[in-house]
Amino acid sequence: EEPILVAVIEIDGASSGGLLHLLGEVKPEDLRIGMKVKAAWALPEVRQGSILDIRYFKPL
């Protein structure tokens, strides 16, 4: 069974802190502090204008 991976994502240009969200398309052994990621969005027709429109973050 695949582990559920989460991280605190810091948005470039935002104030300090971050948001806790899922990671995807990455193996646990490949995770690194400070790695650059991008959002994997839900399909436009199912987006609702919430944070849940981001399915997960994945490495660049």
Image (tube, rainbow, N blue to C red):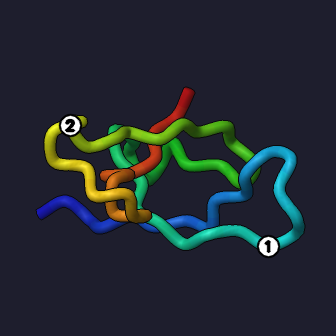
Q: Position of residue 55 (x, y in %)?
A: 31, 52
Q: Earlier in the sequence, mark 2 or mark 1?
A: 1
Q: How many marks?
A: 2
Q: Give the residue type at disc 1.
A: Gly
Q: Amino acid at mark 2?
A: Leu
Residue 15 in percent (x, y) is at 88, 64
Residue 58, numbered circle: none
Question: Which residue is drawn at the image coordinates 11% and 63% (left, top)?
Answer: 1
Q: Disc 2 versus disc 1: distance between alpha carbons?
A: 28 Å
Q: Which mark is residue 43?
A: 2
Closer to the camera, 3 or 55?
A: 55
Snapshot quadrant of residue 35: top right
Residue at the spot x=58%, y=39% of the render?
Answer: 37
Contact flag, marks 2 and 1 (Cβ < 8 Å): no
Which one is in front, 37 or 47? 47
- Which quadrant would the C terminus be assigned to in this image? top right
Which quadrant of the figure has residue 40? Answer: top left
Residue 3 falls left or right of residue 54: left
Residue topped by disc 1:
17
Asked if residue 53 lies left or right of residue 6, the reply is left
Image location of residue 39, percent across then percent down:
47, 41
SS class, disc 1: loop
* Horizontal side of residue 57 vs 1, given as left or right: right
| Location of residue 49 with respect to 25 vertically, above or below | below
The label nearer to you, 2 versus 1, is 2
Please give the name of the residue rendered at 71% of the width and 68% of the height, measured from the top-left corner: 18
Residue 3, compared with residue 31, is above or below; it is below
Give the crowd class for mark 1: few <14, some 14-19, many >=20 residues within 10 Å.
few
- Considering the numbered disc 2 on the image, is that residue within a helix, a strand or a loop? loop
